[in-house]
Image (cartoon, rainbow, N blue to C red):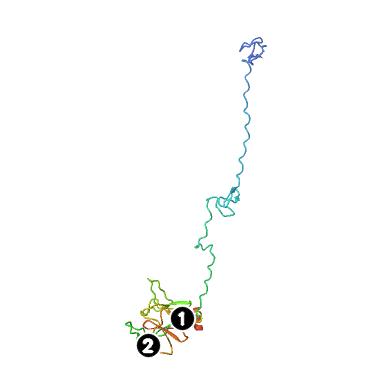
Amino acid sequence: MTVNCPSGHPSTSTDYCDVCGLPIGAAATPAAAAVPAPAVAAPGPTATPAPAPAGQSCPNCQEPASADALFCENCGYDFTTGTMPRAASPLDLSSAGPPPPAPPAAVAEWVVERWVDPDWYAVQQSDDPCPSPGLPTVIPLTEKSLLIGRPSRSRNIHPEIDCGDDTGVSRRQAQLTTDGQRWWVEDLQSSNGTYVASAAGPLPEDPIIPGQRQELNPDDRIYVGAWTRLVVRKATPEEQAGQA
């Protein structure tokens, strides 16, 4: 027969343990206490799942947005690149609308005829050869004040009434002005003077006073340079139609 001693050893002897010699009926000493069962690790705290990402605010306008938003719905800020949307370029034809229509050109009610006058040339004693007389050059008068003269690119002079082929005309010869109904001419300290005379009378001999405006009569003619005669008149309906 096999029994267990107080220490738990199996023993065939019923009075003393065959292994440790303790009396079979003796109480177990602290040294002979049974080996404690291995401790079972207490379960750790249950892992808390990571919270869903909170919303975000736009760095540009502070507008709240969802965490997975790619763009700010308020200002268009790009959360993925950290930039604002590119402004439309003036050359971006895909976003630009049709160009605005050009304003209609002003139709001149007055014109000036520029003639080559052989009679005026004959009394000027110019060394330049006189061009062949022919039909006049008609220049629409679209401004209230217009310069008579010869152009100079270096001096940035661009007369509205260009007498560039007549070298007897100064760069800034004279100024024409109007109130819409009447016209005045003023000599601008020109080299050879500015002359005014009626078409029915003889050629003028005395220039107008520089710096003083002289009103033009309907039949007056302006003489400048070596051969140039200017006539200010109302534009004909055909001339106005050609400007439109």
Closest to the camera, between mark 2 and mark 1, is 1
Q: Nearer the viewer, residue 116 or 179?
A: 179
Q: Residue furthest top?
A: 15
Where in the figure is residue 199, as x and y percent of width and height?
43, 88
- Say which mark, if any, is on residue 184: 1
Q: Secondary structure at mark 1?
A: strand
Where in the figure is residue 1, as x and y percent of width and height?
67, 13
100 lies above or below 216? above
Q: Which residue is identified by label 2?
A: 119
Mark 2 residue type:
Asp
Where in the figure is residue 74, as x and y percent of width and height?
59, 54
Number of other residues with Cα within 10 Å of mark 1, as a class: few under 14, some 14 to 19, many 20 or more:
some
Q: Secondary structure at mark 2?
A: helix
Where in the figure is residue 49, as x and y percent of width and height?
62, 39
195 lies above or below 43? below
Is disc 2 in contact with disc 1, using a CB cutoff of under 8 Å? Answer: no
